[in-house]
Image (spheres, rainbow, N blue to C red):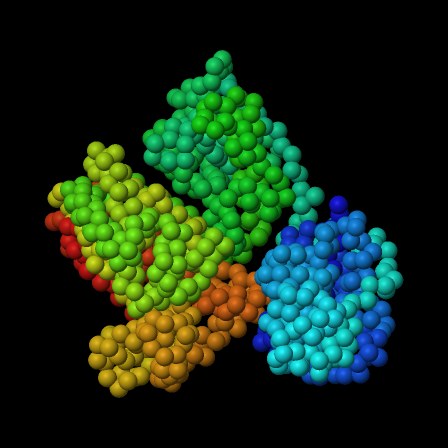
Amino acid sequence: MKTITIIDTFGFFFRLYYAMSSLKTKSGKPSGMVSGFANFIANLEREFKSDYIIFALDSKGKTFRSDIDPNYKTNRQTPPDALLAQLPVCIEMIEKMGFCTAQKEGFEADDLIASVVKTYRDTHKINIVTSDKDLYQLIGGETRIYSYAKKMLYGRDECYEKYGVYPEQIIDFLAICGDSADNIPGVKGIGEKGAKKLLDEWGSLERIYENIELLPPNKQREYLIASKNEAFMSQKLATLCDEVEISPLHNAVFPEQNPLHKIKEILREYELHKLLSALENEGGKSEESLAFKPVCVREESELMRLCEGISEDTIVAFDTETTGLDSKNAKIVGFSFCFNEQKAYYVPLMHNYLGVGEQISLNSAKMAIERIFSGFVVGQNLKYDFNIIEQNFGIKPPRKFADTMILAWLINPSESVGMDSLAKRYFDYDTIKFENIVAKGETFASLEFDEATKYAAEDAWITLKFYFKFQNLLSPELLNLAKTLEFPFVRVLRDMENAGIKISKPNLSELISRNESALRVLTNEIYELSGESFNINSTKQLGVVLFEHLGLPCQKKTKTGYSTDESVLAGLKEAHPVIEKILAYRELYKLQSTYCEPLYALAMKNENSRIYSNFMQTGTSTGRLSSKNPNLQNIPARGALAKDMRNCFIAQEGNSLLSLDYSQIELRLLAHFSKDSALLQAFGAGEDIHSRTAISIFGDSEPAHRAIAKSINFGLIYGMGASKLAQNLQIPRNEAKGYIERYFASFATIKEFLEGLKNSAKNDGFITTLFGRRRYFDFANASPMLLATYEREAVNTKFQGSAADIIKKAMVEISPHLSAEARLVLQIHDELIFEVKSEYAQEFGAKIREIMQNVVNLNVPLVTSLDIATSWGELK
């Protein structure tokens, strides 16, 4: 069954306008609606997989509904000039792109949509893009409403969930409660809640009036009697006409080529540079060669012949196949390489299935890999491959290399950078999936040569294609950033991961025992306070106990029952003493199950009691590192339990842990970017910025006032408004609003700068960090709630992303000074932790501090705190 997508065009345009009404070109011309529509078209193929697309348009002048009621839609205000200026441009875009439109004098777009539905509902799936509740009457069978704001389809059940009535009751629903937007009067005095209740009981408007005498003798019945004529007139106004003649469906065939190519002049006029750049780099997927020859190399002479011509300028894609994903323990099974887009080679080394044939020896493989590593190596997630090669052959990473995963991340850090996703996104190519060729519980070693060659050779081939593609997509500045910072940083991360950090098994064992005792005590207290035993870790059971058995007020429900998340429980602290115990239990249980027990298990596996995390360079949109197996970035930093946990991370005997932490780096970046004179002066003079802020707001720096000032200072960087500040400080919103206003009065440039950041992000579609990395936001297609989220994230990325740039550069510059006597073992956001020979710690710390404080030149000095101890918990 083919699909038709129908757009309620003017309603859609109005939504786009109000979502981005502040967006303008550099000359001041309003552009939000044009930008939103162009981005909608850019996403058509992905979001609206459809065979046909129709834009339904209202006709000019009066419609047949004006004859029913002359007041119909007469209350509508004239749209803003900025909207009216863009409306004809958007209509021109539809025409120039060659889309099918539906329009008929005397009828509204809704009637055209109803007529399409009546004509094709039995033979096609139909999706109606609208926010107009009138059109919900058309839902049925394979016809649904698509909410562009919520990105979801509404069928019969979703209609009931949204409005409390079924699609066939929508007309009568509007007949009773009316619709102020269209000046449909309805029954005066009865709103949506009353209309829903009446239709629940009687089913339809006709049955309500047929049984009017059976209704309770109250105001509602009086309203119905008084407004009977208006109700039935409203019913006629709300009923869509589905008898309009529709043009043949072949005129509405979904375009095969990107229609934006036909409106490049409009895109240029409205400065939609991102879309223009995407069009220029589209490259025509169908024109690219997506075929190659996979070759299995099993003769050593052939392998040496293929590798002998490699020089330092030879670009060679490289990939390994192994027995697992953990590079510390995985064994190599084979490797693949590729010089051009016509052929790719797989070299089997350690396959072990029954009847396996001749394979390349490990000695010959080592010589071949050394030769490959003498060239310019291209790979996808090379950190893993470098670890495998060093583990299995003792070969260090090549001098020159490029990682396509990092290049993809620099293009757009919010999108997936996995090989399968990239192949589909850039080449519309479906790669062979590992799970489709390797049986569950088996490894790559069990795969026969033919299947292994197709899979492995494809990895090298597609990686080479990525590299050439990304060279064209990335700006020279970002390519240079990759070469000078991101690729060298791969080596730094490898060294940090391979150093690991020592765990004190006695300390951790004791902490686990204490936690077990404390959890038992808390469990008994919770049972006693709640009056029953239950599984505290079961959200469902906990919800029943709190909201049914104890009768606490329910704040939020989910599809599976009551919500008992932290925000819900925090709001119930005063309601019952059991809540505080549950929160304490959860904090302790998380520490025990997420950190203590898994870390102890890992320490037990290592003869030196060291644990090794996997740090991910491309794991966040801001540029900060993330880590997994185990996640050391989220080890608790504050609270009663944090110090005990961190005391389990210790230096090896004869060594010390040395911490260097950038002091208030994001606030210093705020001063640098905003150039606010008061901030610049405060940081230049080495003042306590939170005390300085407190004095500016309150006239003193008393501890309580300094704490508020600190919340404001850091909150603004994360896009915090008055409501969030009020929540954090547990004060009234108007009081929090007053604090923020006084802050901006003291630091006058900052408000203007932060607003400028938001506006530039909306205009450009991205935010840029200190070193030029970009994070993109789809402002054009964002709902109001999502728009506010994007604004906060844009502001946050400016500071957090720039801080990530700085510490990354510092780590690269520090790396030549590391040795067996001084190793970098952890990076936790703005803090670096080293394990250093104790007698060398002070000297080393002074040297590293100098590097960190001078790694970039800002308008304010960078300052680091330095501390030395034998455990992480003792570091300040």
- For residue 460, say whether it is visible: yes
Where is residue 429 drawn, in percent x and y? 62, 40
120 vs 371: above or below: below
Identified at 61% across, 73% down, the residue is 194
Where is residue 51 drawn, in percent x and y? 75, 50
**Residue 133 in which image quadrant:** bottom right
Of residue 619 and residue 199, the one placed in the foreground of this image is: 199
Residue 436 is left or right of residue 574, and the answer is right
In this rendering, the count of numbered labels is 0
Identified at 51% across, 49% down, the residue is 416
Residue 50 is left or right of residue 859, and the answer is right
- For residue 649, say whether it is visible: no
Identified at 45% across, 32% down, the residue is 320
Residue 233 is left or right of residue 327, and the answer is right
Identified at 73% across, 73% down, the residue is 209
* Rendered-image quadrant of the C terminus: bottom left
616 vs 850: above or below: above
**Residue 207 in which image quadrant:** bottom right
Where is residue 791 drawn, in percent x and y? 49, 68
